[in-house]
Image (cartoon, rainbow, N blue to C red):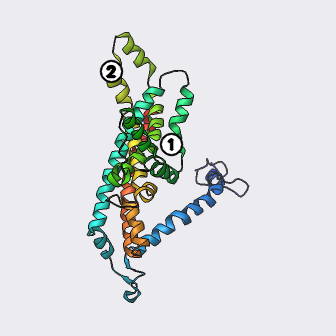
Amino acid sequence: MSVIDAPPTGRERPTADQPSRTNLQQASAWARRAPLLPALIFMFIITQLPFVATLVISFVRWNALRPDLGRKFTGFGNYRAVLSDPDFRQSIYFTIILTVTVVLVSLVLGLLFALLLDRPFRGRGLVRTLLIAPFLIVPVASALLWKQALLNPVYGVFNGLLTAVWKLFGSNNPPQPDWITSHPRLSVEASLIWQWTPFMMLILLAGLQSRPGDAIEAANMDGASRWQMFRFITLPHLRQYLELGGLLGSIYVVQNFDAVFTITSGGQGTANLPYSIYNIFFTAHDYGQASAAGVIVVIGSILIATFALRTVSSLFQEDGK
């Protein structure tokens, strides 16, 4: 057999007139990714570079009120100072209490509203729109609404209703409590619960509408009660939706600043982590310790976000089966 008649070995290089399939695939992949590069670069500049700068500053002693100390690398000194500060530890405690309370109560109320909206009735679209409305309000406006329109001791709605009820029973001296002063933590929690209940309701309503119809029909044929269907069919089906709502709500509530700043200004033990960072940076002007506190909050948020992403991925995998 001559060289010309020899079978190809598969190692011949493609000529210039016949580009390889690998090069074509790479060119096609870059053609699809190229329009996304400007957005990727923009997001990197906006999010990652400031975080890198914050991480670097967290290892530097930098207090604008003490220029005589200068700027000096201090290692983990800022982290030790922040974690040993009793006010910062109190803010960690309040952040945990605030997050757990808001998320749990919002989930329970959201589940009740989702069960209500899952049933057909006249005016359901209007009721759904009204229940979603608090989540669409700007957080600062929501906090101002609670502080001025609802909780104000002089002209607030709550005291107005209390006065009307008191006069209904024949009393001419109704109490006018200052809700924010007497119940500061409850005031912040109520504002956030009112704002985040619609978010939980939407997630759980989507879970209710994705229930398997054949299982519900079989339970009805077997004579199962409403409570039994809710306990053994609906609640297990909503488990991942409850986890998703709780984890996503925790991420946002941990980072909440508007309600604390607007309603109580961090007073009476209501300073959470974002407000403490704001106070360290803009009041104490200690940029090193503020950066260290910010890094601690980011690490905590990343841990929560990791669980949230795992829940979302498992939810998608289950829906794809």
10 and 74: which is toward the camera: 74
Indicate the position of residue 258 as horizontal and vertical percent values. Answer: 46, 56
**Which residue is the site of mark 2?**
227
Q: Are marks 2 and 1 in contact (CB under 8 Å)?
A: no
Indicate the position of residue 208 as horizontal and vertical percent values. Answer: 44, 28
From this viewpoint, is residue 6 visible?
yes
> How would you rate the neighbour count of disc 1 (Cα within 10 Å): few for under 14, some for 14-19, many for 20 or more?
many
284 and 268: which is toward the camera: 268
**Which residue is the site of mark 1?**
134
Q: Quadrant of residue 31?
A: bottom right
The CA span between labels 2 and 1 is 30 Å
Q: Quadrant of the C terminus?
A: top left
Q: Amino acid at mark 2?
A: Trp
Residue at left offset 43%, top offset 17%: 214
In the displayed orientation, state which residue is furthest to the bottom. Answer: 68
Indicate the position of residue 73 as horizontal and vertical percent values. Answer: 36, 81
Q: Amino acid at mark 1?
A: Pro
Indicate the secondary structure of the residue bearing disc 2.
helix
Indicate the secondary structure of the residue bearing disc 1.
helix
From this viewpoint, is residue 320 visible?
no
Residue 248: mark: none
> How would you rate the neighbour count of disc 2 (Cα within 10 Å): few for under 14, some for 14-19, many for 20 or more?
few
